[in-house]
Structure formats: C-alpha cells, structure tokens
Image (cartoon, rainbow, N blue to C red):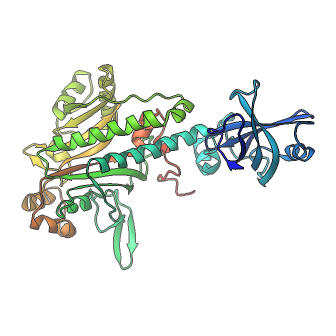
Amino acid sequence: MERKYSGSVKIGDKVVMQGWVAKTRDLGGLKFFILRDREGTVQVTGKKDTVPESVLKKMSEIMKEYCIRVEGKIEKSAHCPAGFEMIPSKIEIVSESEPELPIDVFGKIESGKDKRFDYRFLDLREPKLQAIFRIKARAVQAIREYFIKEGFVEAFTPVIQAAGAEGGATMFPVQYYDKKAFLRQSPQLYKQMMMASGMDRVFEIGQAFRAEKFHTSRHVSEFLSVDFEQGWIDSEEDIMKTLEGMVHYTISSIAKDCRHELKMIEKVVKIPKLPMKRVTYDEMVNTLKKSGVKIEWGDDIEDAQEKKFGEIMAKKGIEWYFLTKFPSEIKPFYIMLEGKYSRGLDLDFRGMEMASGGQREHRHDFLKNVMKEKGLNPKNFEFFLEPFRYGIPPHGGIGFGVERMIEKLLDLPDIKEAILFPRTPDRLVP
C-alpha cells in the first residue's frame, strides 16, 4: 500500500498512514481515534463486525500521542467534518508516549512561553504552529528563486570572522585556535569584497548573531538574515528596486502556495503594491513632531518612534515604506555619505524595520577616513580594505530579517514564535 498524508487522501484509497494519536474514544463496539500527521488529521474508525477483532483490541490499547502506523481504506462519512474516515485493516503501535505530557499540545490548557520552548518538540505538534514554519520555509524558497531569477549568485561567507561589520559590544567572541574571533553580525564585509571579484550580484541566506541583552518581542541573539550586494549601481534607488521586488515576489508566493496554511491560522496576507513609498528622514522627523513625538534632527530612531510612524502610515493605507536620506552620523562606516546626509536606507513594515542598507562607499581613501571618524581602527579591517585598493565598482545592498517579516505578516505576538529554537540572553537550550 502507498503511504499518504491526511491532506492528500481520497475516498476509495487503500493507504498506509503514519502519525500521532490526537484523541481517542471507546464506545465498546465502536472505537475511533484521530490520527495527526504533518498535513492535518483523519478519523480512524473501528466498528465491531466491520474490522478484525485484532484491530479493535489494538485500538483499545492506543493512548494520546502514541506514534502509530495504520493500513486501511478511506470511506465516505457523513459524521466526520472532512467528509471521510479511515477504516483500518491493520494497526501497529510504533512508539508509546507517557500518559502525562509536560504541556498541552493543543493549547486547551495554556502553557507559559518558556515552558513551551522547553518542550518545543511537543509544542510543534500543534498543526497551527507547524503552518507558521511551512510558510517561513516557502518564504525562504521564494527569496532564493527571486534572486536567481534576477541574475544573482548565491554566496556562502564565513560565520567565524576576524571583525564585525558594525563592531561594538554586540559581538559574540569565540576562541579560534590561538586567536580571538567573532560570530558574524552580518556577511556585510565579505559581500562587499565580492564586488571586487567580478561577481557583482550576490546574495546569502544564513544565520547572524547579535549579543544584545534585550528582552523584547522583536530581539533575539540568533536570526535568519537575507543579504544581497549589487554592483554597478547608480544610487541607492537601484537597491530599493531590488529589495521591493524581493518582498513582492515573496509575499505573492506565500499567498499563492500557502493557502492551506494561511487558512489553518486564519490569516490573509496582503500583497504590497509597487513601487513602495519613499520617505526621507526629514519628512519622518517632521511628521513625528507634528504628532507630538519628542524627537530632534540627528536622533537615531527609537522603537517607539518607529512604531508610532508606522501607525501614522497605516492610517494612510501604507504598510511597507522606505526611509531614506538618514544623517551621516547615525549610519555605519561603510554607507556612502553626502555631506550631512547618507545614502543609507531602511525598509519598514507596519512600524518595524525589516531591512537596513544602502549604497556603500567604494572609494578606498574615503572609507579609511570614515572609519577613523567613527572611532574604528583601519588596521583591524585590512582584510576588508585591501580589495578597495584594486578597483571596485559603485555598489550597495541590504540585510533583511526573515523572522521579523513572518512575525508581522502573520501577526505573531513575538519574533520567537517564528524561530524553531530561539536563542536569547536567557535561552541556550534546547
């Protein structure tokens, strides 16, 4: 018999199904249980004189969350919500479960977030939670499809690095033989080095690390970052066009290919219109001031201010928007400067930053001078500066947080809900 999942069986099929027992009922001559697999559930029904006595006996032994294998036939049923049920001819108990679970898999008894993450393997047996990660997987697949379609080459840069793209105290040190190294904050510096190689369109999807001791719903110590770098650009506008195209393609793919998962979690995703709104830093500051927010020109944008601006934009029907022309002083050393302004940009979604980047500085002497002005020692970045001595084109790129997008797109209460095993200042296991 062919093995099938609950989402693909049809009336009349003779199949093998495998999964976990979600619920059992024993009415003597009538027994049934709900079998749960990765695509949903199906009712398995055993009736006296309809199935073998050995099967009825086995059904009496089954308990919740047992791991089982069932052979049988899919038949029409007016009593089941799905319109069909499985009549078993053979049942095998593959693995037993302890009768008392540390958390309620289906959330009827609400477990605390920490407890759920302690037993994440049980927590994820809830089909609605699994749907989140199938949507996330499709998002990552779509991002890769988009870049390949646009002529980008996927790059794989080191996670262990000699220096960070942004420096500071947010770096995780590691002992690398007899040297001190760090887990990457970003593949930023290596992406830029690729621009000197002739591979002038690269992207990377991988883990990044920030040693930030925040305890908020939007910060984690390890996250999935999408980064791209694009050479021979005219301005940061080229980067915005690539980025908004990526977002549009990704959300369109989710809307098209994840209908089952979106229905399961009762969410409808809105595909953004292109081009996305461009808002300068000056316009943002003036808008916030008019709404009563205390902010001065040159201030870095705080989370509360960012959220407030998102609310203002939402009233205008705008969810996705770029923030541009930031003050030079608040942008990293590698962003190109133009007097008191920079060519940096952020992409926000409903008041939360999704991506940050812009046009990079490609002139060697300018780059060294900005490093010094930012309090960095160019000697610590010699490996990065070397390519700039031998010709590198105008270029730019971004870093984009996948889990932040999933969190906001699906209205999740916390970014950790979009991460299988989140890492925070307080959580290292499981």
Establish if 264 lies above or below 225: above
Counting labels gives: 0
Q: Is residue 212 above or below residue 44?
A: below
In the picture, measured across the screen, residue 38 lies left or right of residue 177, that is right
Residue drawn where x is 39% and y is 39% of the image: 405
Q: Please state the horizontal and vertical placement of residue 201, each as a whole percent of the image.
A: 23, 54
Residue that lies at the very extreme toward the front in this rendered image: 12
Image location (x, y in percent) of residue 311: 34, 25
Residue plotted at (22% across, 25% down): 287
Q: Position of residue 218 (x, y in %)?
A: 42, 42
Task: State the residue in front, 55 or 180.
Answer: 55
Q: Could you tell me which residue is drawn at 21 percent across and 44 percent down?
A: 239
Which x, y percent locates residue 94?
A: 76, 55
| Quadrant of the rendered image containing residue 196 | bottom left
Residue 24 visible in rendering: no
Taking the spot 58% from the left edge, 48% from the top edge, the residue there is 117
81 horizontally vs 53: left or right = left
